[in-house]
Amino acid sequence: MYYKEWERSPYSTAHNVMNLNSQNEWEPQTSSSRVTVGMRPQKPKMINNKQVFIIGNGESRIGFDLEQLRDYGKIYGCNLLYEEFTPDALVAIDERIMHPCYWSGYPIENVCWFRDWRPMPGEAYELLTDSSIISGDPNVDMSDYLYTNSRNDSTEFVLHGTHKDRAEEYEAEVREKDKNKVLDESAIELVFKAGIYTTWLNKNGDKIKNLGGGSFPVEHQAKYPGMYQQFKNNGPYSSVDRGQNYIPTLAMNCGPTAQLIASLVENPTEIYLLGMDIYSNTDRVNNVYKGKQGYMTATGNVVPGENFILQHHDMFKLFPDIKFFKVNKFPLGTDDINREVPEWKDTPNLEYLTYADMFRRLAD
């Protein structure tokens, strides 16, 4: 789905959003139609709360029925998973995923963890969506850069954005270095696309939990101060010296972030990682949702696995008492996806399973 402002109202820069229907045609979608049609409600109680499943979006999980996991433990999912399946908690960290997710109505009834999701008073909307916020050019037409939903009676909104001028400067630098045009255009458009995403919040509330600016939830930093300090000491970007007063963001990719949240919230003894492919069998992107909003197309470059490898490794070390299982479709050595990760060999609390192995273990 792709949403954009089209008509103006006295209360909001955008009166309607646009929805791409099943016939590949644009149609208006007002807030009254933002309901969770066809979405399975989250299960209020699970049989086993000591087992957690983290669902990544690698293509190895295509064809696997996630419903089979419901009676074995809690399920945490990433990004666009909500369009096809309702996990016990959804984790999203990119504005191009979080805001359309809210517009769909999903977070009204279903638990979501969103990054830096900070409500602001409605009186600040016009000021924060002015063209000067996104560009030094006062003549910029904001209808090309503002993505939002209907305000109705909402009194608060959330805003994320990418500055147009800065994005263009960075894109020019990258293109200059990429003289052989290795980068696919869909990858460049995804990374350097400028715009402001805003969401008017449901006045009656929702089930969103704010991660804060990083990956370690703010509400758990005080609850687990020693673990949070360990995360800061050993986590991503913590070794980068940017001055005495610099506070690292400690923001990981979505999969490792979901792994961290589930470990803190559920206190499980076992975590199963499904669809965390890390690698690709080709030089193109490996993702179930390629070509959808917030993702590269099928021609997009393969996403380097280095960050995923390091961040998952950090989580294995941070929670030594949890047994982790990387679940592959086929046995190790079958191909580039179904293989052992060399950087994880020093991790005693990690084991590799096939789907068949996993179900045998769950049955026991």
Image (spheres, rainbow, N blue to C red):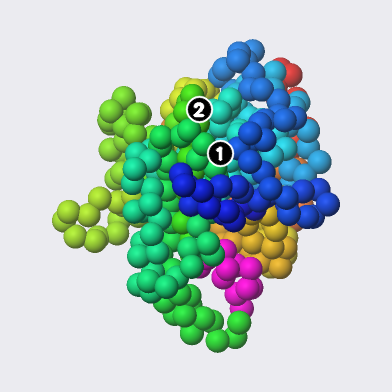
Q: x%, y% of residue 19?
A: 69, 49
In this image, 100 relative to 347: left or right? right
Instruction: Residue 38: say if magenta.
Output: no
Residue at 48 percent of width and 63 percent of height: 142
When the figure is inspected, residue 35 is found, relative to residue 116, above or below; the finding is: above
Which amino acid, by three-letter code, is at mark 1? Tyr
> Visible in this render: residue 307?
no
Residue type, numbered disc 2 = Asp
The residue that label 2 is drawn on is 206
Asked if the residues shown at circle 2 and circle 1 are in contact, with their CB atoms under 8 angstroms apart, the answer is yes
Looking at the image, the residue that sits furthest to the right is 23
Q: Residues within 10 Å of mark 2 (few under 14, many from 20)?
A: some
Residue that appears at 38% across and 59% down: 130
What residue is rendered at 66% in x and 66% in y?
Answer: 300
Q: Is residue 171 visible?
A: yes
Q: Depth check: give the residue in front, 292 or 99.
A: 99
Is 239 or 148 nearer to us in this picture?
148
Report the quarter where the C terminus lies: top right
Q: What's the magenta region?
A: 182-193
Q: Secondary structure at mark 2?
A: loop
Residue 178 is situated, as x and y percent measured from the top left of the image, at 54, 82
| Marks 2 and 1, the one that precedes in the sequence | 1
Res. 239 image quadrant: bottom left
Q: Write down the residue under mark 1.
A: 102
Q: In the structure shown, which secondary structural element does the residue marked by tag 1 occupy?
A: helix
Q: CA distance from mark 2 to mark 1?
A: 9 Å
* Residue 81 location, quadrant: top right
Q: Position of residue 197 (x, y in %)?
A: 49, 52
Q: Residue 163 at x, y = what percent?
A: 41, 65
